[in-house]
Amino acid sequence: MSLPSDARIFIAGHRGLVGSAIVRRLERDGCSNLLVRSRRELDLTNQAAVHAFFENERPEFVFLAAAKVGGIHANDTRPAEFLHDNLMIQSNVIDAAWRNGVRKLVFLGSSCIYPRLAAQPISEDALLTGPLEPTNEWYAIAKIAGIKQCQAYRRQYGFDAISLMPTNLYGPGDNFDLLNSHVLPALLRKFHEARVSSQSEVVLWGTGSPRREFLHVDDMADAAVHLMQRYDGDEPVNVGVGEDVSILELAQMIREVVGYRGAIVHDLSKPDGTPRKLLDVTRLQALGWKASISLGAGLRSTYSWFLAHQQDVRN
């Protein structure tokens, strides 16, 4: 399946990290009929509003990138919001898309759906085989429900909905809040502010030993469009790079990119989170896609974007 340049494509969450990258990718391909709505214009947790939008606008394709997201602190302190809001967004959009004749929907999940101690690298078959990471289980459970909803609507109604499981994402448009963001943008801002204010050290949560995989959001958008056109299976597809680094190694790379010369110290009172989370991308690569932006190049371009947008970065 190809995406016609004049196809009506709804990008839910177009102002977010992934949604904005998908918009950039589609515009680069010449797609001229993109449907976007801000949260103020369309509350995706409001079932009646979502159904009215689909009835009026009749999108042909949907990228469901809207979600309530955050790092360890946000997930751990606001579990009700992360469970309720994500369940409502997913349920409303997937159901409305099916009821209004959408040709295909791509649902964006998360690698946190997998068991905390899953064998590494994590294959899609690891889903529901063990306990989740406690600090983000509410978000994970909501995303698992989204996968199952896509599968259920495919099996019962023949609705062409696929699920993609991204690894940790970063890039332009990220949330750089020091308390509620993910680890990479939080560290980038920490090191930047430490350099600007001549701080002697930067504090790193936990031991720095957990290992994480990082995918540039422009690669994620490219994969989403590729799979929209090339994949129509029942099972989720991991989207990652197939390589990981320790949090300490990431911090050292960011320190170098930012040009900070101080020390890195550890706050061992803070949690590490999942010990390791590396995705098996065998299925993705068999479908003809592989990441192209290296972590080093991605960090440099993300820092350049941050410097150019300090006045309006989300925080």
Image (cartoon, helix red, strand yellow):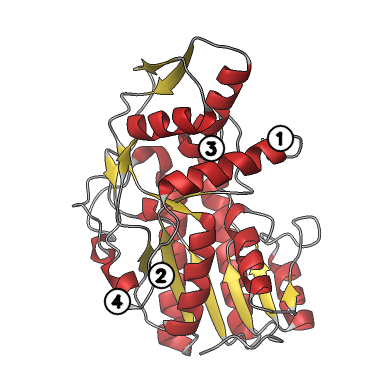
Q: CA distance from mark 2 to mark 4?
A: 23 Å
Disc 3 element: helix
Measure how far apart labels 1 and 4 are at the Cα level: 40 Å
Q: Mark 1 highlights which residue?
A: 310
Please tell me which residue is depicted at 38% across the width and 54% down the height of the picture: 111
Residue 182, can we see it? no
Residue at x 53% of width, y 32% of height: 188
Where is mark 3, residue-wise? 185
CB-based contact (under 8 Å), mark 1 and mark 4: no
Label 3 vs 4, first from the N-terminus: 3
> In this figure, which residue is indicated by the disc labeled 2?
148
User: Residue visible at 68% across and 72% down?
Assistant: 27
Q: Amino acid at mark 1?
A: Gln
* Relative horizontal placement of residue 277, taking residue 78 as reference (left or right): left
Amino acid residing under circle 3:
Pro
For the residues labelled 2 and 1, the Cα–Cα distance comes to 39 Å
Eye-nearest disc, 2 or 4: 4
Q: Is residue 164 above or below residue 33?
A: above
Disc 1 vs disc 3: which is toward the camera?
A: 1
Residue 17 x %, y %: 60, 53
